[in-house]
Amino acid sequence: MGKAKTRKVECMIHTENLCKTYRMGDVVVQALRDVNMEIKDGEFVAIIGPSGSGKSTLLNLLGCLDKPTSGAVFIGGTDTASLSENALAEIRREKIGFIFQQFNLIHTLNALENVALPMFFAGVGRDVRLKKAEELLVKVELGERMYHKPSELSGGQQQRVAIARSLSNDPAIIIGDEPTGNVDTDTGTAIMQILEGLNREGKTIIVVTHDAEIAARAGRTKRMRDGKVLE
């Protein structure tokens, strides 16, 4: 169970006949239906669709937060569906940075501590992780707010902290689930500019959104409906 299958693949992420089914009492909900897609190293891809189309379910599978009912998700040639929970956690820690619509910051920690936290779990020494957290907060233009707690920051500033946190272990992939969903239009544009800059630096960016204007800023758009990716 801990040893994954691998295949030679040029893409950063590749799915094969990906399906996800949920059972709610006697009702079976097919959230994803035979999704096949490829995301190349260094791409910026937006996944767009109405509520209930399967966007967030797909993102959870691409980010190794969940396992498919059937089919496969390959990351860097490794079939993640065959990995143990510990191995999945290692991939999430080392290869994937997450940005959530609700920010998911720890409210008892200041911005610096929130950004440094993933490095603690990766075994990085205190001085090194605090120095890097400072550098990342400066990168997202929050150098003067690093000792403020989330309750002392605006929604846009909290999302910038979340972006800095997603970069803490230098992942190759950044995944954003509606990263502009809880901020105003101007702040959303600024957040997209940060993501565009990260993409120019070589990061693979995957963003789920319901906003066509936000999706248009990506290099490529995938549309979803009823659990399927439309051509």
Image (cartoon, grey):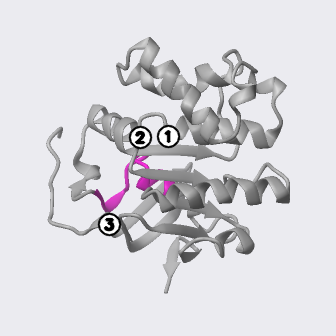
State the residue position of label 2: 170
Residue 152 x %, y %: 83, 24
Compared across the picture, whether 80 is left or right of 208 comes to left
- Please check the rendered image and state whether residue 63 is part of the magenta-colored stretch, yes or no: yes
Q: Residues within 10 Å of mark 2 (few under 14, many from 20)?
A: some
Which three-letter amino acid code belongs to the residue tagged 2? Asp
Q: Quadrant of residue 181?
A: bottom right
Residue 17 x %, y %: 33, 71
Q: Quadrant of residue 16?
A: bottom left
Please, what secondary structure does the residue beneath circle 1 have? loop
Compared across the picture, whether 131 is left or right of 99 comes to left
State the residue position of label 3: 14
Q: CA distance from mark 1 to mark 3?
A: 22 Å
Q: Quadrant of residue 193?
A: bottom right
Mark in front: 1 vs 3? 1
| Residue 223 or residue 160, whichever sits in front | 160
Residue 146 in view:
yes
Residue 58 in view:
no
Q: Which residues are magenta?
A: 59-75
- Specify which label sits upstream in the sequence, 1 or 3: 3
Q: Residues within 10 Å of mark 3 (few under 14, many from 20)?
A: many
Does residue 47 lie above or below 4 as drawn?
A: below
| Residue 93 or residue 197, whichever sits in front | 197
Q: Residue furthest bottom?
A: 231
